Image (cartoon, grey):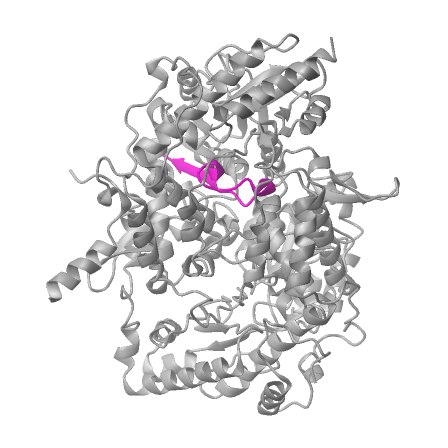
Amino acid sequence: MTSLLERAALDRRKLLMDRSRSGRIGTTLPPLDVPEAQLPEPSLLRDDLDLPEVSEGEIVRYFSQISQFNFSIDHNFYPLGSCTMKYNPKLNDEIASIPGFAQIHPLQPVATVQGAVKLVWELQEVLNEITGMAGCSLAPMAGADGELAGLLMARAYHLDRGDDKRKNVLIPDSAHGTNPASAAMAGFNVVTLPSDSNGNTDLDALRDSVSDELAGLMITLPSTLGLFDTNILDVTRIVRDAGGIVYGDGANLNAIVGRVKFGDLGFDVIHSNLHKTFTQPHGGGGPGAGPVIAGPRLVDYLPTPVAGRNEDSGEEIFSLDAPAKTIGRMGAFHGNFGALVRAWSYIFTLGKEGIPQISEDAVINANYILSELKGYYDLPYDRTCMHEVVFAATNLRREHGVRAMDVAKRLIDYGIHPPTMYFPLVVEEALMIEPTETESKETLDYFIEVMKQIAAEAAEDPDMLHEAPHNTPNTRLDEARAARRPDLRWRRQE
Amino acid sequence: MASNEFQSPYVPNTDPDRRAMLDAIGVDSIEELFADIPDGYLNYDLDMPSARNELDLTRYARELAAMNRTPGDYACFLGAGSYRHHIPAVVRQVAGRSEYMTAYTPYQPEVSQGTLQTAFEFQSLICQLTGMDVANLGMYDGSTSLAEAALMASRLTRRHRAAVVESVSPLYREVLDTYVQAPGIEIDTIPASADSIPDETACVIVQQPNFYGYMEDVDRLAKLAHDAGALLIVSVDPVSLGMFRPPGEYGADIVVGEGQALGVPTTFGGPYVGLFACKQDYIRQMPGRIVGRTVDTRGEEAYVLTLQTREQHIRRERATSNICTAVALIALMSTIYLASFGRRGLRHVAELCYHKSHYAAGKIEEIPGYSVPMDGTFFQEFVVECPTSPSEINEKLLDHGIIGGADISAQVSNGMLVCVTEMNSRDEIDNLVTALTEIGELHK
């Protein structure tokens, strides 16, 4: 019995090419309904196409079975800090699959896609309004792509003014890795800016870092520490007075959406991750969308295209335009339209009443977790948090040799996806918890109890935590071996 | 206590829940939690419409969708980088499973084996298809794959010029221009027949089949690149690889391409998946996510994100790319598509496109006033020289229920790039020919 079950478990993990049986096929093929043309000369053709041959039912069973090895929002509480893993409304998927959206081609004449461009324009307008900015391009296809666009806009702005000394971009030490990586791709030097003991920007360090070589500052608001920088008005003023551009990473927009506008605070350009705040499903690593939204100084540099509306003729006519000084195209077409439709559906479902409720409940939920777990885990910044709270497992490490990794993996045994761990880098043994507004108090209470229990388990049986998780298809993986001996694809066994 | 009467269906908190949590936190009001926001900057005054119910919003979305002329309702002959192919029902059904759709990037491998194993499948099948050693988990789209490949070639060769064959898609070349402006890589445009390239060229970039649908002499270009110490980057249409020779066979160093043709709806341009494959030696300079096979503490095989020291979350400003969130779910769709068609099916689809497009080209060439001016072997697209501007013709074709080919008059005088796939029935092709004939007669 056991061996049969073991075999079944192994069979579930068999790769497509090992499942292949000559002669099977997973779909029907339409016949040729025109006369055959002469095929090209054989030297241009291949005869080795080696793809799996499997039937449709086998495909469905295989992909369905292994799908269940995933944790996902629909099945699990997923408090992954800075990732805003909130519930993804089903209505959005239904609307995105309407053929008039899903089946249209990107190169259709704009007169034949007026509904799609109108939707794009409406989303641009509402994102401008929510963030307090002047203009928006929905072309960037992820947050990091929006960062690259925004920084290329800053670069073009300085160069346009003949200001070619501005090479430095300031980035706080708590920033997400995409910030420095994007700055480097946009040709800038990265200068790291320290936080002060309250988790705010260190204003003295900032004043010391600005010069006529300052291109700008990239800052996440609230920060990846889950804190609203109480120095923010000074920060934006110092950077602007020095001739720099203020870039806002909108990854944590969920904390302040409908409550504070980036434009009011002195930001020149921001991006918003539609797959975080605006519920595009994360898909196991995309697709997302990262619109870049600009204030008056940078609006002419937005990437192509930007949707426009003209009412001169008495009726609305929508167009896809290149801004006056555009940095160019971020992708072949108009951005991830499928993600844009979902964000549009979400935003207009909630409306002006529902949008501020997002940040309200996200912040209450995070502070509730903060207040209930304080004392059980170290709290490096003991102040009101925004949408997420960063604890540290330093007390467990010190007392029991239990690390953030162990806590994270043990949560899996309780059916909870781990928080973000070991990030931000400025916090040792960080556990960054973002509950989002879509979780109930009952779920939060369960999580809180589990976290307390894990703290107790750390004292009683630390080894059990080192070996967690215990009930998953695989135990902890040998990541060092994966990197040392890269095995990156199926190969036929000789 | 909530700011208003509206109760979001996506928020479970009720006022008593909020009160209980605020009490536990030890504050009187929600406002106290937002006290860090500077005075005078709290702004709830959103100038946007009120909440809309599901019924109402769906109705409005359908109105917007109905303003579009939708391929399917119309015969459509557009390609030029986004291709209509039949997508088996299993692709959407399986990729739409919420276990895949609502999971995050698989940083926690013990609870992400579904995503990770299917990603390994994707990498494997892209290698099988292209004949390359390794593939990553995908870039945003084919154009950003191409731009990132140019940056990678520059890092590998420490050279700062790229030679781009003039028949590469103009849209892709625009994206390349965006990406190279900061690192200062100079772009040289070369004809496919070039017999030399500038010194210090990092890569030769060719599209196969090219933007106009035709096959380039890639063996010659491979030699041209390699003799000069440059890498050969090939941008492919993956469906064409159902029948045509894979780039691994003619010496490509990096292969990129638009994966959308493999099971992904055209969706007005995205989300798609940029294919990215290369030779084994180059993996440590690759951008993007890569999944590897390893073992767990019990010695059982499992999958994990690997070679992460290339990536932004570890290497920060020295990463090979800034890419983070990519297009994992779209890669999954392509994986299911390739599994469904398999060895025989993909060949069949490719041949259908080949035969049908040749049938169409033959018929169009017979119409007075139209010609098919280019010589050589094409796959599923070809250029038609029209008697008048293609945009004008396309406008008239709409009255015949047809969305015509792409207007490429910027590249070819009165040029229309016509794409024919298995989606176009013989009737559709014949109707196109009849309509073009009628429209042509008006311009004699």
Q: Residue at x 71, y 69 (%)?
A: A258
In the rendered image, residue A217, in percent from the top left (x then y), is placed at 67, 57
For the residue pair B151 and A446, the one nearer the viewer reads as: A446
Side (left or right) of B223 relative to B421: left
| Above or below B428: residue A400 | below
Q: Could one spot residue A167 in this view of the protein?
A: no
* Total numbered badges shown on the rendered structure: 0
Q: Quadrant of residue B390?
A: top right
Q: Residue at x 61, y 92 (%)?
A: B23
In the rendered image, residue B132, in percent from the top left (x then y), is placed at 34, 33
Side (left or right) of B3 relative to B168: right
In the rendered image, residue A294, in percent from the top left (x then y), is placed at 74, 52
**Magenta span of residues:** B258-278
| Above or below A79: residue A372 | below
Q: Is residue B268 magenta?
A: yes
Q: Could one spot residue A437 in this view of the protein?
A: yes
User: Quadrant location of the N terminus of chain B?
Assistant: bottom right
User: Quadrant location of the C terminus of chain B?
Assistant: top right
Q: Is residue A138 magenta?
A: no
In the rendered image, residue B291, in percent from the top left (x then y), is placed at 36, 50
Q: Quadrant of residue A449?
A: bottom left
For the residue pair B12 and B247, the one nearer the viewer reads as: B12
For the residue pair A269 and A213, the one nearer the viewer reads as: A269
